[in-house]
Image (spheres, helix red, strand yellow):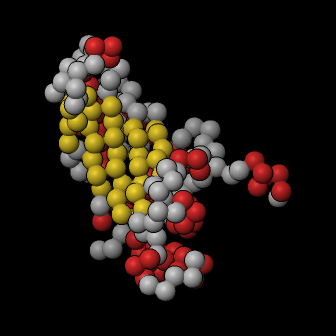
Amino acid sequence: MIPKLKAYYDEKVAPALKEEFSLENTHQIPAIEKVVLNCHVGRYQADRKAAVEDAVAEIEKITGQKPSVVFAKKSVANFKVREGEAVGARVTLRKEMMWEFLDRFINVTAPNVRDFRGFSPKGFDGRGNFALGIPDQAIFPEIEIDKIKRQLGFDIIVVTSTNDNAQAKRLLDGLHFPFRENKKDADAA
């Protein structure tokens, strides 16, 4: 079964982007390649091992895919980190899992954020990829608020097939990604 957001991309967004950017080849149309979720537990120094286990469990509930544990590459005395010590978790979503996660994130999770006005469009990296930070896992409906042991923040990176920020922004706009309006645009309206 094709995910709902993927079908919407194929039917509406891709043809519109092809026409808007005058692309001849269908492989030039901007597309989402993968979504990466990261969680770093650096501030929980006393019980870092338990915090990493919690991060793995929370990411697995949110994405439906088991994340891999991230280990420190080198020791840093100021951060009290030893080389080879577990410091976080990450998961890479592709294909159906990616589309399902994005659909839930755009339509269910983002509107659950208190006083949400949209994500800043400044999160593009210059290569067409968009990164945003989530300060608390409680916004995800898959997480039971009563069972949260510690507050964990997440980084979500949406990797696109284009190297142009404008094309990537139009792609995410077409998928109804909740971006914050620019003050200049709001004043002109």
Question: How many circles with numbers are drawn on the protein?
Answer: 0
Q: Residue furthest bottom?
A: 24
Q: Quadrant of the C terminus?
A: bottom right
Residue 120 against residue 97 in the figure, above or below: above
Could you tell me residue 32's position as x and y percent?
Answer: 40, 64
Residue at point 22%, 26% (across, down): 74
Quarter-of-image position of residue 3: bottom left
Residue 149 against residue 133 in the figure, above or below: above
Residue at point 40%, 33% (across, down): 153
Residue at point 20%, 46% (across, down): 66
Residue at point 29%, 61% (across, down): 94
In the visual, does 174 lie left or right of 42? right
Q: Residue furthest left?
A: 84
Q: Residue furthest right?
A: 188
Could you tell me residue 39's position as x and y percent?
Answer: 33, 36
Q: Nearer the viewer, residue 27 or 139?
A: 27
Determine if residue 91 is in view. Answer: yes
Could you tell me residue 111's position as x and y percent?
Answer: 55, 48
Quarter-of-image position of residue 1: bottom left
Residue 33 against residue 35 in the figure, above or below: below
Q: Nearer the viewer, residue 139 or 65?
A: 65
Could you tell me residue 93's position as x and y percent?
Answer: 30, 56
In the visual, does 146 lie left or right of 53? right
Determine if residue 176 is in view. Answer: no
Quarter-of-image position of residue 114: top right
Residue 171 against residue 130 in the figure, above or below: below
